[in-house]
Amino acid sequence: MAKERQIIILVDDNMASLTMGKNILKDKYDVYPIPSGEKFFEILQKITPDLVLLDVAMPDMDGYEIIRRLKASRKTQDIPVIFITSKDDPGNELEGLSLGAIDYVSKPLSPALLLQRIDNHLLLDSRKKELEKYNRHLKEMAMEYSSQNSELLHGTLGILAEAAEFRDVHIDGHVKRVRSYIKLMLDELAAREVYHNETIPLDQHFLLPASQLHDVGKLFISDSILNKKGSLTEEETALMKQHPALGASLIDQIIPGKTEHIFLHYARIFSVYHHEKWDGTGYPHGLAQTDIPLPGRLMALADGYDALVSARPYRNAHNADEAKNIILEGKGTWLDPVLVDIFYDNSSKFAEIAGRKN
C-alpha cells in the first residue's frame, strides 16, 4: 500500500506566491493553497495539516492573529507553523517565534531551502510524537510497577537526545564524544583522589547516559537561530540562553510526580548548569566555583572543547592546538582549574576522541 502523503496548508493573500509554493511542494506533499485566514479556519474544520506555511503580512487577519488562534485551541495548538515573510526585521521574527512558530523562511522562496526546512521539521515532529508515545507507555509502567525500568527510560530519553542533536546539522556525534570526555575526566579525578566528596556519590551507570540530554532545551530553539551563518542578534542570544532552563523544564515533565529517577536528576543537572562559569559570569543562575555541581563543571569543559574543534556556520573548526590553548586560557575564569589541569595532561586523548565524528 502506498505511503499516505503528508498535508501542507499554504496561507498567503498573494496568488503568485500561492502558485509558486504549490508548484514547489506538490510533487512531495498534498498542498492546499489558501488565500486568507478566514478560508484557512474553514478548511481546518475538514482537514488537519501536518504543517502550515503562513504569510505574515495579510489584510483582515495577519499571520500573527492566525497563529494566536491556532495555539489557543487544543485541537490545533500542536500543528507546526513556519512563517513566510518578505520583511527583514529581527523584531518581527522574534515576535513570531514567541507566538509559537517553529521557523521563518524569506521570500522569494528558494525551492531547495524550503523543501529541506519542511523535511527537517516534519521529521523532528514525527520524532517528538514517537517520544510522546514512548512516554505514555513509560508512565503506564510507572503506575503499574513500583520499581522503575531504567533500560526503557534510557531508550526513551535517548530518542529525545537524538531529536535535539538532529536540529543542529553541525554537531554529528557530539553527544557521544561529550560522554567520552566526561568519562575520561571522572577516571582521572578518581585516580588523583580529587573532588572525592563530589565524585563518590555519582553513579556513572546513570550519569554518563544522562549527559546526552545536556542540550535537549535546543528543541525549543528555532533552526534559523541554531544554524545561523553569522553572529546572533541580542534578541536571538537571549532566546538561545533560555535553552538550559527549557531543557530542565522538559525533563521535569518526563515522569511527573514525587518520585524522581536518578537518571533524570543527573540529566537535569547537565541541562541547567553546563553554561555556568567558574568565575560566576555564566547563565542561567550565575553560580561560581564549586557552587556549580560537578557534572555541570565537567560538561562546561567537555561541551566547550567539542564546540571548539567542530565547525560552525559562522567559523571553521579549530585545530587541536588552537582548542587546547583556548581551554588553557579559560582556567579559573570560564572553567574549573582542576579540570583544566586534567585536560592539559590528557589533551592528546581529548584530540583522539574529537576525531570520532559520528
Image (cartoon, rainbow, N blue to C red):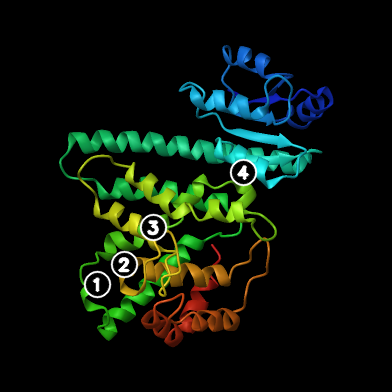
Determine whether label 3 and label 4 are within 8 Å by CB: no
Query: Which mark is first along the chain, 2 or 3?
Result: 3
Determine whether label 1 and label 2 are within 8 Å by CB: yes
Which kind of residue does numbered mark 1 sit on? Glu
Res 94 label:
4
Left or right, 267 with respect to 16, comes to left
Depth order, front residue of 216/332: 332
> What residue sits right under mark 1 in the picture?
198
Query: Which mark is first along the chain, 4 or 2?
Result: 4
> What residue sits right under mark 3 in the picture?
272
Q: Residue at x 20, y 68 (%)?
A: 201
Which kind of residue does numbered mark 3 sit on? Val
> What residue sits right under mark 2 in the picture?
293
Element under disc 4: helix
Q: CA distance from mark 2 to mark 4?
A: 33 Å
**Residue at the left extreme, as displayed:** 146
The local crowd at label 3, few if under 14, some if 14 to 19, many if 20 or more residues have their Cα within 10 Å, is many
Query: Which mark is first along the chain, 4 or 3?
Result: 4
The local crowd at label 4, few if under 14, some if 14 to 19, many if 20 or more residues have their Cα within 10 Å, is some
Locate residue 318, reporting x and y percent.
62, 75
Element under disc 3: helix
